[in-house]
Amino acid sequence: MRARARRSLLIALGGVLALAALGGCGPAPAPDRFSIAGGGVTGVYYSFGGQLAEVLSSRLGSEVSVDETNGSVDNLLRVAEGRALFGFAQSDAAADAVAGVGAFPEPLDVQAVARLYDEYVHVVVRSDSDIRRIADLAGRGVSLGAPSSGVNIVATRVLDAEGVAPSDVEDEALGLAESIDAFRAGEIEGFFWVGGLPTPGLAELFTDAPARLLPIEPATVDRVNARHGGAYRLAEFPIGAYGRTQATETMTVPNYLMVAERAPDELVRDVLAVLFESRSTIAEEVPAAALLDRRQAIFTDPVDLHPGAVAYYSQSRR
């Protein structure tokens, strides 16, 4: 897969990467067009990607677009194979990708550009449901997220930490928009989602549907971390989130902007410069973008930062 990913990326960038691989003369120009692997259209990844694509198109002179995808796993594969130049991914999925474990039979040639913000694990059930704990999801119709999504990775890990196998639930395997539609129609009793606050589709759901958030208890978070490398942390949905009047315990996972290893250093530096210079503008439409912090953006272990990102952060400290 590594060789195929490199060949695909070289084709996708039309010789730009070939110049970079040869050490080229001078900075590599931005491609005429490229895409950012986003996520479902009602999620933060897609909104963030759309806003970033808009400012990049204006600043770099490239035609940049955001792709609707199934989420983190799908995005990482697209980036590695050259179907997207950049992509969003949860840190747990990115760590699996570079190690070649879990959903990835072989390591992918991808690296991080920035740690963006922490995503919250949402477990949504009906307000009048008798489901009170994660363990109560056994035997219920629940969506654990779309195939090839980071949501699915987190959902199965949370269930496992509570002694519930994925086969113990009636998993409809839906993306966010489809989960919301099925929930409204009474076709499922709940669903998992992992995203920034607020996630647009959920903000609308909590406004006009009888829904509540199921807590993820501290002991559950501890068990997930013990089994999966400590990427997660205990958090709370703050009072006011989705119109709530009380806090709810949950866990969060960082997410990264990812790129292929062979992407030109200069291009990665330029994209980062635009990202940080435009974060206030992006945050007007995507509040999670306001959490982007240059001091925290470099912490992407165990995923390596791309050399172009290292150069950008080093220069920005001078």
Image (cartoon, grey):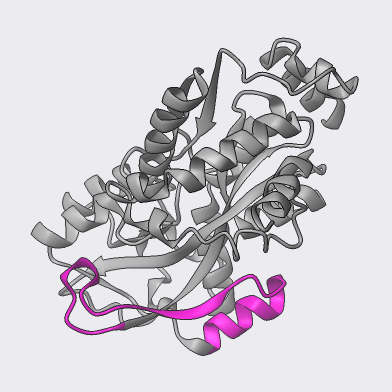
Which quadrant holds residue 165? bottom right
> Outermost residue toward the left?
208
* Residue 248 among magenta residues: no
- Position of residue 46 in the picture relative to residue 168 (left or right): left
- Position of residue 42 in the picture relative to residue 135 (left or right): left
Q: Is residue 226 above or below residue 309?
A: below
Task: Quarter of the image for the N terminus: give it.
Answer: top right
For the point 82% across and 23% down, which residue is it? 20
In this view, the residue in front, 260 or 21, is 21
In this view, the residue in front, 117 or 101, is 117
In this view, the residue in front, 227 or 267, is 267
Q: Whole-percent x and y of residue 70?
A: 48, 39
Q: Is residue 308 above or below residue 1?
A: below
User: Can residue 273 be seen in the rendering of this structure?
Assistant: yes
For the point 37% across and 59% down, which residue is it? 142
For the point 52% across and 24% down, which residue is it? 60
* Residue 230 among magenta residues: yes
> Outermost residue toward the right?
22
User: Can residue 163 be seen in the rendering of this structure?
Assistant: no
Which quadrant holds residue 136? bottom left
- Position of residue 55 in the picture relative to residue 162 (left or right): left
Which quadrant holds residue 259? top right
Q: Which residues are magenta?
A: 219-247
In this view, the residue in front, 279 or 168, is 279
> Outermost residue toward the bottom?
219
Task: Quarter of the image for the C terminus: give it.
Answer: bottom right
The total number of labels drawn is: 0
For the point 73% across and 30% down, which residue is it? 263
Q: Whole-percent x and y of residue 157?
A: 58, 68
Q: Whole-percent x and y of residue 182?
A: 25, 48
> Outermost residue toward the front?
318
Q: Is residue 258 above or below residue 262?
A: below
